[in-house]
Image (cartoon, rainbow, N blue to C red):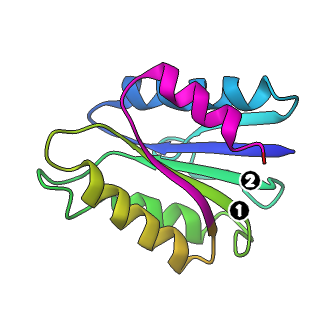
């Protein structure tokens, strides 16, 4: 199976890149292929070729009421994503994690993605564990 791990972060880009790379490592350890994509920088990527999508983003507001507008824009411009299995994640934030995850899931479902997992990640080890679980 081939997966794309796409993250959207402007303030904590390194943290989200590390989490995405660890998810990819866990996924690859199960005998699959994975590509890590920075959704803020690589806006011309096509997701049609992937069987599984993992999308992560940081909250844009203090309480997680908003996520980056680039998430919706990216998903709508990357080819056919409707009906693909997917996973949503965000990093642990004291006030905004669960609400931002909920907003991300709404955007993904609006684009027609079928969510199989959603998780708030605390550390890279948890991210790698998630990558191993999403194989099924």
47 up-or-down from 27: above or below? below
107 up-or-down from 92: above or below? below
The residue drawn where x is 15% and y is 39% is 94
Number of marks drawn: 2
Residue 106 lies in what quarter of the image?
bottom left
Residue 24 is left or right of residue 104, and the answer is right
Which region shows up in magenta?
115-135
Which residue is label 2 attached to? 52
Q: Which mark is residue 85?
A: 1
Q: Position of residue 91 (x, y in %)?
A: 35, 37
Residue 105 is left or right of residue 94, and the answer is right
Q: CA distance from mark 2 to mark 1?
A: 5 Å
Q: Kindly state the secondary structure of the residue where label 2 is placed.
A: strand
Q: Is the Cβ of the residue at disc 2 closer than 8 Å to that at disc 1?
A: yes
Q: Position of residue 38 (x, y in %)?
A: 53, 39
Q: Kindly state the secondary structure of the residue where label 1 is placed.
A: strand
The residue drawn where x is 66% and y is 63% is 78
73, 89: nearer the viewer: 89
Q: Position of residue 53 (x, y in %)?
A: 67, 53
Q: Quadrant of the N terminus?
A: top right
Q: Is residue 118 magenta?
A: yes
Q: Position of residue 110 (x, y in %)?
A: 51, 79
Q: Which of marks 1 and 2 precedes in the sequence? A: 2
């Amino acid at each position: 199976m081939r997966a794309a791990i796409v993250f959207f972060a402007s303030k904590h880009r390194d943290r989200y890149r590390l989490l995405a790379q660890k998810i990819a490592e866990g996924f690859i350890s199960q005998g699959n292929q994975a590509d890590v994509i920075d959704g803020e920088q690589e806006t011309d990527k096509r997701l049609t070729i992937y069987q599984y999508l993992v999308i992560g983003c940081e909250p844009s507001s203090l309480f997680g009421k908003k996520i980056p507008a680039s998430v919706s824009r990216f998903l709508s411009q990357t080819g056919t994503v409707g009906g693909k299995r997917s996973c949503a994640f965000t990093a642990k934030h004291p006030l905004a994690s669960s609400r931002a995850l909920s907003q991300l899931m709404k955007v993904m479902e609006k684009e027609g993605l079928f969510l199989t997992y959603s998780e708030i990640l605390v550390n890279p080890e948890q991210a790698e564990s998630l990558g191993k679980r999403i194989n099924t």
